[in-house]
Image (cartoon, grey):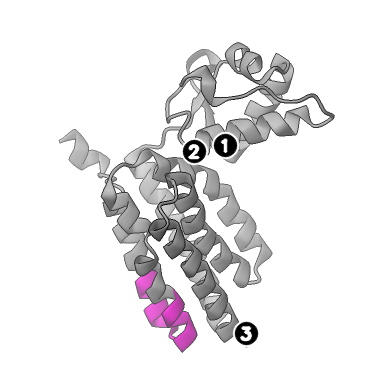
Amino acid sequence: MSGQALSSLTRSTTLREQALVALRTAITTGQYRPGDHLGEVEIAEHLSVSRGTVREALRHLQQEGLVTAGARGMLRVSQLTPTEVRELFQVREALEGLAVAQIIASPRRQEAAEALRKALEKLHDAFTTGADLAAKVEADLGFHLLLCELSGNSILLKTWRQLEGPMRVVIMSAAGERRDLAMSATSHTPIADAIARGDAAAAQEILHAHMTSAIEQLGIEREDVRDA
């Protein structure tokens, strides 16, 4: 990654938080790619902060799953294997499936469906207005985040958010039109429609198909097939 991607930070009492936000953004928007080395000295120079501040920010990003310690403790942007990506989607499906079930069982189901449709409008706009990839990913994951928020289950939401960082890296790392197809509003609309109808079985089937299709569209191969 070129040093131009990170700009100096203004001095304040929240330098650590600013460094954290800058690094997280650089990773989740693809400025740093999976496997890229994250050197404390280089980053500290670009952000005009101390190595200690950078070290604290990187430690926090390790907890979020965005950064991994490799050989000799060298920190790199996390790089998930195809198996780990599939497992990530499986856990997402389980969490969002529970969210769907709880929304449908709620007396505010119709309100939730309407909120999800508004989120789909934002997703549709991100594609039709020519927004950049980061904005599209934000709108796509925003729909799924809202799905979890509308469940009213705080533990479910907290758990899903722990997957958000790695999921962003996976999506940003994928390439081509197939990725856009996986994130399109059209692929999400049936989920909101099934919730509006109160059809839990259909919603679960649609969600499963959506996650399975997303893995395929993102070009994730099984490791045994890839090795063969």
Residue 29: which numbered mark, if any? 2
Residue that badge 1 annotates: 25
Q: Which amino acid lies under the numbered mark 2 shown in the image of this protein?
A: Thr
Distance CA(mark 2)–CA(mark 3):
35 Å
Tell me whether circle 2 and circle 1 mark residues in contact (CB < 8 Å): yes
How crowded pointer 2 is (Cα within 10 Å; few <14, some 14-19, many 20+) is rated as many
Asked whether residue 111 is drawn in magenta, I would say no
Q: Of the two numbered discs 1 and 3 on the same chain, state the one appearing first in sequence.
A: 1
SS for dot 1: helix
Q: Main secondary structure of the magenta part?
A: helix
Which residue corresponds to the image point at 35% horizontal and 66% vertical from the top-left? 187
Q: Quadrant of residue 186?
A: bottom left
Q: What kind of element bears circle 3?
A: loop
Residue placed under numbered mark 3 in the picture = 108
Residue 161 position (above or below residue 145): above
Indicate left or right for 47 with 224 as reference.
right
Q: Is residue 41 visible?
A: yes
